[in-house]
Amino acid sequence: MDEEVVSFEGLEIRIPDYTISYGNTTIPFPRKEFEILIHLFRHRKKVVTREAIAHAVWGSSIEVTNRTIDVHVGRIRKKLGRYAHLIGTVHGIGYRCHIP
């Protein structure tokens, strides 16, 4: 998937710029949070484990705890505001992106 800009119900994700906007608000994302969001988006409709997220974003040489992933996802949801529901939790496993 080589999408550069993703638009959904007023939400716009600009992958090259690491930014998300809705309405007149543009929100810059820290690199790791944005990479998590994009990883979830690229695997949308599938459950993505915390381990898969850690490996994709931090690599295999750094150990990342489940709590670290959860905190980052919480920050992503907060920044998404009314679109927070697009990142669903699959308890005990990981997350699923609901952006079509």
Image (tube, helix red, strand yellow):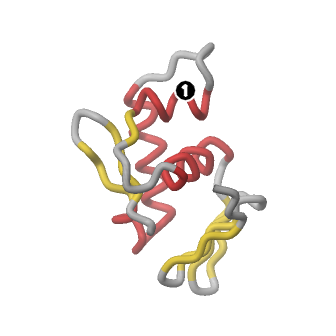
Residue at (60, 34) in percent of width and height: 57
**Amino acid identity at mark 1:** His
Q: Nearer the viewer, residue 48 or 89?
A: 48
Q: Is residue 79 above or below residue 70?
A: below
Q: Residue 97 sits in which quadrant?
A: bottom left
Q: Position of residue 95 (x, y in %)?
A: 36, 45
Farthest residue, direction front: 1
Local SS, label 1: helix
Q: Is residue 15 left or right of residue 70?
A: right
Q: Residue 62 sits in which quadrant?
A: top right
Q: Nearer the viewer, residue 10 or 41?
A: 41
Q: Position of residue 14 (x, y in %)?
A: 69, 66
Farthest residue, direction right: 16
Q: Position of residue 74 (x, y in %)?
A: 41, 49
Residue at (42, 71) in percent of width and height: 83
Residue at (66, 49) in percent of width and height: 30
How many numbered marks does the figure carry?
1
Q: Quadrant of the N terminus?
A: bottom right
Q: Residues within 10 Å of mark 1 (few under 14, many from 20)?
A: some
Q: Nearer the viewer, residue 18 or 68?
A: 18
Q: Is residue 70 above or below residue 13?
A: above
Q: Residue 92 sits in which quadrant?
A: top left
Task: Identify the residue under disc 1.
Answer: 55
Farthest residue, direction left: 91
Q: Is residue 13 above or below residue 2?
A: below
Q: Quadrant of the C terminus?
A: bottom left
Q: Is residue 84 left or right of residue 62?
A: left
